[in-house]
Amino acid sequence: MITTTTPSIEGKRIVKYLGIVSGDAIVGVNVLKDIFAGIRDIIGGRAGAYERELKKAKEIAINEMIEEAKDLGANAIVGIDLDYETVGQNGSMLMVSASGTAVIVEDE
């Protein structure tokens, strides 16, 4: 499955638009991770525990979107957009939403 944030794919011709596809993921951020992120996991201003959770949520959302596109018969998704939010009490969960347009492409 070709996936891209651009509206087209160089060297490929979109022959059919199948519709919008999306995937969502919400992951909880553990209180212990919060504490340790503040104590030992922040290196150079980066919080590794949060980065790992965010990466995991992004992968889940993208994979869900790809599966939805496959179910429609697509071989590519164009115009992908990723949105990130914190939800829950005190922003205790991370939410990632991925959406794009499922298409069928062929070589030009």
Image (cartoon, rainbow, N blue to C red):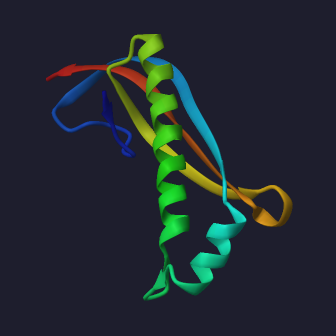
Q: Left of 14 or right of it: where is 24?
A: right
Q: Which residue occupies 61% across, 56% down?
A: 84
* Count of labels in the image: 0
Q: Left of 61 or right of it: where is 7?
A: left
Image coordinates of residue 106 in percent, x first then y, are 21, 19
Image coordinates of residue 33 in percent, x first then y, are 62, 68
Quarter of the image with the N terminus in it: top left
Q: Which residue occupies 38% across, 17% down?
A: 74
User: Which quarter of the figure has residue 16?
Assistant: top left
Observer-nearest residue: 68 or 88? 88
Q: Left of 107 or right of it: where is 42?
A: right
Image coordinates of residue 107 in percent, x first then y, are 15, 22
Observer-nearest residue: 102 or 15? 102
Observer-nearest residue: 25 or 40? 40
Image coordinates of residue 4 in percent, x first then y, are 35, 41
Q: Which residue occupies 48% across, 60% down?
A: 52
Question: In the figure, 72 relative to 40: above or below?
Answer: above
Q: Left of 79 or right of it: where is 85?
A: right
